[in-house]
Image: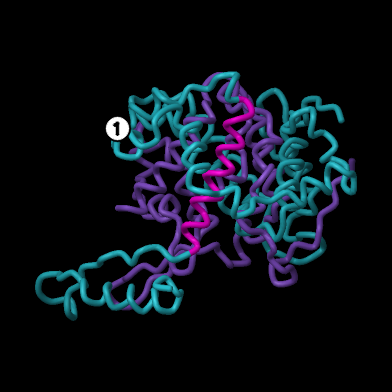
Amino acid sequence: MTFGRTMIDQGCLSDDAIDRELLRHGIECNMVNGEYSGVSLARYRRIVRLIADDLGHINGKSGNPFSRIVKGYSLSIILSVLWEKSPNKQSLLDFILAAELSMGRSMLRPQYSELRLPGSTAHKQWLQLEFTRDDLLLGQVHAATDVLLGGDSNTMRSSSSLDRCTSAAVWTHQDDVAVPAALERVACSVALEHLFKRPVRLGRYQYRGDGAARPDCVEVVVREVVDALIYGQFS
Amino acid sequence: MPLTLRSERKVDVMHQLSALHLRGTSQILVPELLFLSPAVGLLTHLTSGASSSSLVTNLRSCYTPLTQASDTNHSIVPAVEIAKEFYHQRVHGEHRRYGPTALSRSRSKASYWLQPSSLGCIVGMALSSESTEVAIMSSICPKNLIIFEVICDLWSYYD
């Protein structure tokens, strides 16, 4: 599959170009895949431009230290939405393939080009790839964290300095394969840890809007105990 | 290869995606576009029960006076708008207690009608513009972004 510049070229996100791309995915004015939506194309264009605008600030004109590290919160949110809307692993691949088609640039490494062919051997094997519990042992996750943080992960976990993080995270050619694999392992491990609900946050409330706000410590403890009993955390 | 839009209405499809399926989703990507890995989305998502993504919640609660945008806050205004477009947060009671953020189910929002393939299309279009082209080639260090996502989440977890 060859990739040339799409109609959205010359750095111009024109309305017509965006509308044509959306039409390829069944999105028209007030209609989506033949179903009445009542949503105009302008709203979709707005989302595209917001993301482009967010990424356009990447070169960071301000002295904000975060601008050197985080490139586009909007992309993180979109990818988070992707997880909520994806029913299966194939949907994740659909996202990647649609993105590369619209972008006019290949997102897949050459050795995975067969994934573009549904039903191919590589495609089927990829769909069946998943972590097992043996792949997520503590030592392996720590090793993956070391790869991502480029050093002693124990020191990184105890440090609150973002400068240390940025200096440690140097992208090298040697990380070409190790970093994506480590990212997957760490993300999966963190996600599985969160399967059990997060701790209840302590709140401070007034009684009927009067008086000083007081913390709800006792309620939090009772809720945590009940949740632990329900979710079997004590077993 | 023609794009086929699958039947992806949430009510009709059984969700079979778990974190374990993350394997292989980042390794297939070219290094300079690793920031588009679904693993990054999972770290941001990490929704479980009544909890919600700290990033989304914090962005939604940002107050960004657009008329007084400076270099600092202007850079997050688009992200705030995106968070408000895709996510909803209920307000309870007379004391205005905020519930967890959840994906918006409002049919009058464009975000409701976007499915994985159309999301990819939108991201691709946004990334194809010239300003982002320069950004991709020169500024993005995917590893930094990934690490920041991990650390942000771990910090918020223990906050």
Secondary structure beneath dot 1 equals loop
Which residue matches tag 1? A161
Q: Residues within 10 Å of mark 1 (few under 14, many from 20)?
A: few
In which quadrant of the rendered image does the C terminus of chain A lie? Answer: bottom left
Quadrant showing the N terminus of chain A:
top right
Height in image: B89 above or below B143? below
Image location of residue B49, percent across then percent down: 48, 68
Determine the residue located farthest toward the left in the rendered image.
Answer: A211
Q: Position of residue B28 (x, y in %)?
A: 71, 36
Q: Residue at x 72, y 69 (%)?
A: B14
In the picture, measured across the screen, residue A195 lies left or right of residue A153, that is: right
Is B44 drawn above or below residue A68 in the view shown?
Answer: below
Q: Residue at x 36, y 75 (%)?
A: B92
As for residue B63 lying within the magenta part, the answer is no
Residue depicted at 61% across the width and 33% down the height: B34
In the figure, residue B37 lies in which quadrant? Answer: top right
Q: What tint does the image give chain A?
A: cyan
Residue A186 falls within the magenta-colored stretch: yes
At label 1, which amino acid type do we have?
Answer: Ser
- The kind of secondary structure the magenta stretch mainly shows is helix
Image coordinates of residue A112 in percent, x first then y, are 79, 34
**Residue numbers of the magenta segment:** A176-195
Colour of chain B, in one word, is purple
Q: How was this image coloured?
A: by chain
Name above or below for residue B38 compared with residue B138: below
